[in-house]
Amino acid sequence: MPGNSFGELFRVTTAGVSHGPGYVAIIDGCPPGLPLDVDDLLPDLRRRRPGQSKIVTQRQEEDIPEIWSGVFEGRTDGTSIGILFKNQDQRSQDYSDIKDKYRPGHADFTFDAKYGFRDYRGGGRSSARETVCRVAAGAIAKKVLAQHDMRVLGYVKQIGHVIAAVADPAQITLDQVEATPVRCPDPAKAQEMIALIEDVRKDLDSIGGVCELVATGVPPGLGEPVFDKLKADLAKALLSLPAVTAFEYGAGFAVATSRGSQNNDAFVRGDAGKIETESNRHGGMLGGISSGAPVVCRVAVKPTSSLPQPQQTVTRAGEPTEIVTKGRHDPCLLPRFVVMGEAMIALVLVDHWLRWRAQCGT
């Protein structure tokens, strides 16, 4: 099946299904000499893993990675990094009643249309559990970026009708994000979000929202001017994540009601004589190339499609029927999504940074 790899110079390939033995991630292109062990991967993996709070799925997966290659004596050796994750808490029987039914909002029908058959146990290859590989690869990418003073951070900006007040995305800290289980840096709105998630969970329903992602310290010059624009690769990366339905950066859709005189960011002479912009409506990218301002983007994440309430559907034969999805599912995907979004931002940035460095001969 094509489409299992992402990136050019920093390339990630994943394999596995949610109810199989486990997952494998292969990371090519990581510079040699980077200090790396399992403990470097665990913080982000713990932010992604299920069962971490009462407002997420209660599937119990510790997600302890096994590094099988690419690291020697605590440092990357320049060869492919192989990481293995073993599944431990599958309940495939939860899906036996729906193997011939199409779940609304899922890829069941489209998988059958493409391949002629599918793994019905939790969605098979399309399961969001695949993101455990991306988060591990993203943690490595973040380490490379940190060596060059770049940082990636995400947080929950909106759940349902509840919207956080964030004056300056570049000033948000990890401690602020992690202060509540919903991962919203606005404490008052975070409590409203938690209450909303609890309400929809009691109603056997789900709710969507918006994740905002910020990269700081990104130097000007990353990205290509035509097809491989930095914004285009960020959009592809984030839209490749399960449940993401929309992407915007900078002022985003607000530009539709703006005039050019309102939307343009004026250039100024900044600290140490550097050229900067007074504002950042361009989201850190001009012409698809980074400007040196914080890269700011947002994605909309749909409500969880798997619901424990009756929904109308059809069988593979087209017969009308009713479906109730059993299993353990997030009433809201946003709290666990944050680190997945960060991982994809980091993978794009490190890939473009390596391409820029190769192009400049540094």
Image (cartoon, grey):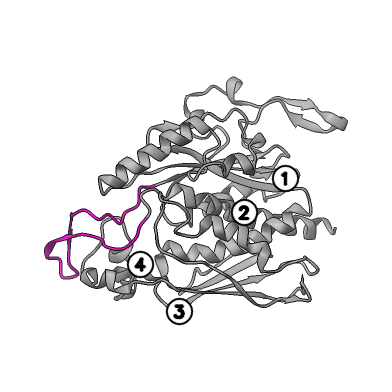
Q: Is residue 145 left or right of residue 99?
A: right
Looking at the rendered image, the disc whose residue lies closer to the viewer, 2 or 1, is 1
Q: Callout 2: few (<14), some (14-19), or many (20+) C-alpha neighbours within 10 Å? A: some
Q: Nearer the viewer, residue 263 or 20?
A: 20
Measured from the top left, where is residue 133 in percent x and y? 55, 66
CB contact under 8 Å: marks 2 and 1: no
Q: Which residue is mark 4?
A: 123
Looking at the rendered image, the disc whose residue lies closer to the viewer, 4 or 3, is 3
Q: Which residue is mark 1?
A: 218
Quadrant of the rendering where the N terminus is positioned: bottom left
Q: Residue at x 59, y 56 (%)?
A: 343
Looking at the rendered image, the disc whose residue lies closer to the viewer, 3 or 2, is 3
Q: Callout 3: few (<14), some (14-19), or many (20+) C-alpha neighbours within 10 Å? A: few
Measured from the top left, where is residue 49 in percent x and y? 50, 60
> What's the distance in space between the residues labelled 1 and 4, CA to CA?
36 Å
* Mark 1 or mark 4: whose residue is earlier in sequence: 4
Measured from the top left, where is residue 275 in percent x and y? 80, 32
Q: Is residue 110 left or right of residue 340?
A: left
Q: Nearer the viewer, residue 179 or 246?
A: 179
Looking at the rendered image, the disc whose residue lies closer to the viewer, 1 or 4, is 4
Q: Residue at x 63, y 67 (%)?
A: 11
CB contact under 8 Å: marks 1 and 4: no
Amino acid type for the residue under numbered disc 4: Gly
Q: Which residue is mark 3?
A: 21
* Mark 3 or mark 1: whose residue is earlier in sequence: 3
Magenta range is 302-329
**Magenta stretch containing residue 317, yes or no?**
yes
Magenta region, main secondary structure: loop
Q: Which residue is mark 2?
A: 228
Q: Residue at x 31, y 54 (%)?
A: 305
Q: Is residue 361 above or below residue 260?
A: below
Query: For numbered disc 4, what is the local secondary structure?
Result: loop
